[in-house]
């Protein structure tokens, strides 16, 4: 009996090994066509979409595909969410040789642990320059250097705009978007109502459950700052301030009034997009480029009626920081196709291809793109985005910055949903961050 079981187990193992071998061989054949080099890109799916023009209605074409055809290269994209992308990259960087040739990295991860393992790009730039790299503004380059060496090239920013549904605004007697922090607080309450068809509308939505950015965006409109970083890189925690307390107090009030989603601590980008496109939310925080999704007649019930403008100011006389994140292209030190990877980065960074990617829905890093007639014809709101970029702020990464933002998310969410009082959450936030930076 035992012998029969052993034989069955051995048979199963052999079959599984054979299947795995066949699958691996098939995968190798598919990924590496004969005579072609395979170049692997690790990114969020949005980068593939804008580089290849995969979203319906875009007009920029397949930039990467054309380059690959000219250079006899097979392109493999590995796409995932923000955190999974960087977790995969960390694992790849720990190997003797990585399968990743170009990695799209977001600024919050650009700390010494990551940047020390990326290829310095200055030698490549000297040998094969990127067209007019100096055009890219300094405030977009904050997450591209390590110990004075260039280690990444900016490709996309996620400067947040305020999206608002003109139909729902009109139903509530509102004719323009809010302009100040006080107004967005009042508008959010007024736009929380039941429509004539029975649809429950939430005043303001954002992906508050996915990291720190959306909550911090709301608080920045009140003038709150979590920390400051001087020229020498010294970090000072500034969490326990009247501005932080007022912003969290108002956000907690909106939560109690159901003017922000009831699943505040878990809501995702997909949830947010669904609420806006179906009319279950009247306003949303999100990158300007999301205008394309929100007005796509294939997915939206309000095509043409969802507008976008820059974020509100602190008050009539004081502009708020326009918080943004930057995605940049980097080459792992242990990549095996560095020269080829650099050539594709140069291709994606050219002036013409920056325009083409913008026509595919990208948020471009070159100011000249915002005045290109082709872009303005398709996206007239790019004028507002260009204006907002002038006051855009990228939050610098530092040692333990990821842990700092995790602490901020925990304490701010606790304050909003009522697990702690706002005052207790802010004091705890200040104390925990000071302890983190001084350890």
Image (cartoon, grey):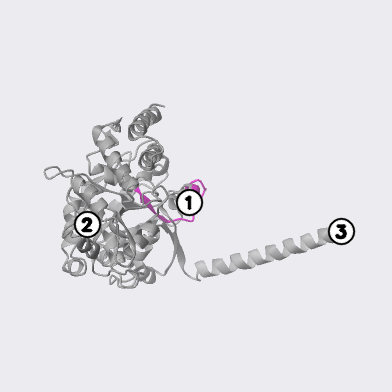
Q: Is residue 231 above or below residue 194?
A: above
Q: Quadrant of residue 421?
A: top left
Residue 162, can we see it?
yes
Q: Position of residue 390 (x, y in %)?
A: 17, 49
Mark 2 highlights which residue?
366
First-in-chain label (1 vs 2): 1
Q: Position of residue 82 (x, y in %)?
A: 41, 52
Mark seen at residue 357: none
Q: Residue at x 39, y 51 (%)?
A: 262
Q: Quadrant of the N terminus?
A: bottom right
Q: Quadrant of residue 238?
A: top left
Marks 3 & 2, CB-CB < 8 Å contact = no
Marks 1 & 2, CB-CB < 8 Å contact = no
Residue 362, can we see it?
no
Q: Position of residue 156 (x, y in %)?
A: 30, 56
Q: Secondary structure at mark 3?
A: helix
First-in-chain label (3 vs 2): 3
Q: Is residue 305 magenta?
A: no
Q: Position of residue 321 (x, y in %)?
A: 21, 44
* Mark 3 nearby-residue class (10 Å; few <14, some 14–19, many ≥20): few
Q: Is residue 33 above or below residue 10?
A: below
Mark seen at residue 88: 1
Q: Is residue 182 above or below residue 227?
A: below
Q: Secondary structure at mark 1?
A: helix
Numbered disc total = 3
Mark 3 highlights which residue?
3
Q: Is residue 101 magenta?
A: yes
Q: In the image, which residues are magenta?
A: 91-106
């Amino acid at each position: 009996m035992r012998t029969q079981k052993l034989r069955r187990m051995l048979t199963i193992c052999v079959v599984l090994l054979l299947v795995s071998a066949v699958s691996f061989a098939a995968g190798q054949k598919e990924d590496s066509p004969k005579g072609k080099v395979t170049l692997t890109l690790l990114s969020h799916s949005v980068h593939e979409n804008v580089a290849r023009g995969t979203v319906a209605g875009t007009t920029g074409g397949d930039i990467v595909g054309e380059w690959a055809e000219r250079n006899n290269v097979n392109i493999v994209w590995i796409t995932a969410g923000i955190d999974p992308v960087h977790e995969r990259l960390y694992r790849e960087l720990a190997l003797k040789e990585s399968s990743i040739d170009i990695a799209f990295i977001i600024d919050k991860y650009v700390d010494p642990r990551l940047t020390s393992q990326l290829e310095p790009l200055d030698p490549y730039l000297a040998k094969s320059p990127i067209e007019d790299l100096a055009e890219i503004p300094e405030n977009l380059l904050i997450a591209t250097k390590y110990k004075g060496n260039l280690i990444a090239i900016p490709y996309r920013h996620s400067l947040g705009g305020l999206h608002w549904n003109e139909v729902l605004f009109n139903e509530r007697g509102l004719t323009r978007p809010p302009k100040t922090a006080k107004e967005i607080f009042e508008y959010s309450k007024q736009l929380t109502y039941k429509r004539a068809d029975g649809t429950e509308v939430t005043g303001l939505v954002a992906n508050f459950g996915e990291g720190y950015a959306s909550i911090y965006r709301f608080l920045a409109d009140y003038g709150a700052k979590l920390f400051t970083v001087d020229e020498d890189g010294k970090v000072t925690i500034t969490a326990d301030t009247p501005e932080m307390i007022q912003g969290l107090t108002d956000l907690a009030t909106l939560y109690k009034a159901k003017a922000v989603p009831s699943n505040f601590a878990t809501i995702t980008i997909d949830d947010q997009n669904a609420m806006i496109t179906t009319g279950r939310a009247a306003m949303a925080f999100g990158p300007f480029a999301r205008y394309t999704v929100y007005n796509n007649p294939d997915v939206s019930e309000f095509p043409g009626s969802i507008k976008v403008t820059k974020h509100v100011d602190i008050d009539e006389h004081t502009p708020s920081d326009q918080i943004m994140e930057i995605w940049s292209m980097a080459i792992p030190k242990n990549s095996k196709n560095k020269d080829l990877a650099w050539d594709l980065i140069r291709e994606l960074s050219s002036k013409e291809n920056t325009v083409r990617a913008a026509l595919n829905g990208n948020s471009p890093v070159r100011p000249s793109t915002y005045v290109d007639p082709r872009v303005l014809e398709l996206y007239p709101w790019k004028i507002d985005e260009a204006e907002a970029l002038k006051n855009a702020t990228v939050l610098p990464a530092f040692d333990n910055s990821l842990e700092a933002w995790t602490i901020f998310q925990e304490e701010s969410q606790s304050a909003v949903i009522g697990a702690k009082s706002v005052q207790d959450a802010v004091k705890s936030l200040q104390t925990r961050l000071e302890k983190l930076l001084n350890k």
